[in-house]
Amino acid sequence: MRVSLKIGKSKVAPLTSARFLAALYVILFHTAYDSGFSIPRWFKTFLSLGGASVSFFFVLSGYILATVYLVKEGPLDKKRFWMARFARVYPLFFVILVLDTPQILLDRVARYSWATSIWKTSVNFFLDVFLLQGWSQAFNAINFPSWSLSDEAFFYAIFPIVGVFVWKMRARSAAAFGMVLYLGTLALLLLLYRAGLKNDFAYNMPLLRSSEFILGIVAGKVHLSALRSERYRSALHRMALPLLLLCAALFCATCYAKLPIPSPILIGIFLAPLFVGIILALSSNPSVIGGLLSARLPVLLGEASFALYLIHIPLWQVFQAFGLGGVRSHYIGFLLTAIALSICSFIFFENAARRKILDYASAKDTEGTLRSSMAQ
C-alpha cells in the first residue's frame, strides 16, 4: 500500500533551510582559507570536512525524490520525472557553464599553446554539457563543483528502477538493504584504496556515490512507513531534537578525531548515516530548531542554495582576478554578493526557466508539493 496523505510546507521547510547551511559549509571550505581572516586551527579542522556537504545533498536528494514521486498511486511517470529534474537543474548549470568557459580558456592560454588550450577546454565543455564530467578523471569540470551534477544525473537515470525496487520492500527489509549497501560500499572502497585507487576517482565516480542517494530513498521508505502509526509518529517528534543534536555532535567529533580513513571516503559514504539521521530529525518537526528553520528567510536561502553552490567558484575567481581576494572586507562582500545573486537567480531565472520548460513539455513539476505523511 502506498502512503497518499499530504504534507504541509512547514514540514519541508527545515530540510530546505538545511540545504543553505550545507551549501555555505562547502563554500567556506572552498574559499575561506584565502579570505584574509586569521582562521583558528579548530575552525580549519572543522572546515576540512566541508566536502561532506555533497554527501548530504546526495542523501537528501534520494529522500526528497522518494517522498515526492514514490508515494503517489500508480506507476512512476518516467518522462515527467526526468523532464522535471532537467528543468530544475540544467538551465542555470548551462548558463554558468557558458559564462565560465571563456575564463577557463584564457587561463589555459597563459600556460599552454592556443591549440592545447582550445582542445582541453573543448573536451571539458563536451563532458560538462552532457553531464559526464564525474565519469572522467582526465579532465576536470570547468566549474569544478558541478561534477556533482554528473552524479545527480546518474541518480535520476536509475531512480525509476532503484527507487521503485526499494519502495516495494517492507520497511524492515528496506532498512536491512540500506545497511548492507552502506557497509558493502564502505568495505569495497577501503579495499580499492588499499589497491591503489586514485582519490578523485572514488570521490567523483557516480557509480561509487550512488549508495548515498539510495540510502536517502531507504530513509524515505522507512520514515513514511513508521509514520503510519500514531505511536511512532509521536515518538519521532519527541526524539527529533535529541537525534539532531546527537548527529551534529558525532559529525563534529569526526572532524577532530583524525580517523585513519581516506579523505574521499570520510567525506563521502562514511558520514551518510549521520546525514540520514539529520534528515529524519528535521523532517519529524523538531521543536524550536524546526520553527527557526521554517522562517521565511532561511527557506528562501535554502531554495536559492543550488544557485549559490554553482555560482560561488566563478564569482570567487572574478574577485581574485580583480585583486579582491585575501582582504577580510572583500571576502564578506563576496559572500553577500554570492547570496544575493543566488536569490535573484532563483526568483527571476530558475523559476521562470523551469516553468517554460515544463509548459513546453506539457509536464507538471510536483516537487513543490510533497505527497507524503510526516510527523505532526
Image (tube, rainbow, N blue to C red):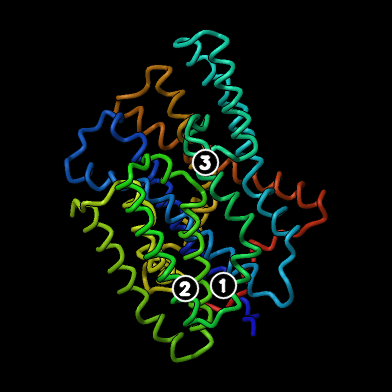
Name the residue tied to disc 1: 166
Nearer-the-camera pick, 50 or 359? 50
Circle 2 sits on which residue? 177
Q: How many marks?
A: 3
The 10 Å Cα crowd at callout 1, few under 14, some 14 to 19, many 20 or more, is many
In this rendering, the answer to whether 73 lies above or below 82 is below
Q: Give the residue type that dot 3 points to.
A: Gly
The amino acid type found where label 1 is placed reads Val
Quarter in which the N terminus is drawn: bottom right
Q: Indicate left or right for 293 with 121 as reference.
A: left
Q: Which mark is residue 134?
A: 3
Q: Element at badge 2? A: helix
Q: Helix, strand, or loop for circle 1?
A: helix
Residue 180 on image: x %, y %: 41, 70
* Neighbourhood count class around disc 2 (C-alpha, 10 Å): few under 14, some 14–19, many 20 upward: some
- Is 237 drawn above or below residue 289 in the view shown? below
Tag 2: residue type? Phe
* Numbered tag placed on residue 216 in the rendering: none
Label 2 close to label 1 by CB (< 8 Å)? yes
Q: Which x, y percent locates residue 211? A: 47, 60
Tell me the distance, in whole angstroms, between the alpha carbons under discs 2 and 1: 8 Å
Residue in front for this viewpoint, 28 or 150: 150
Q: Nearer the viewer, residue 103 or 324?
A: 103
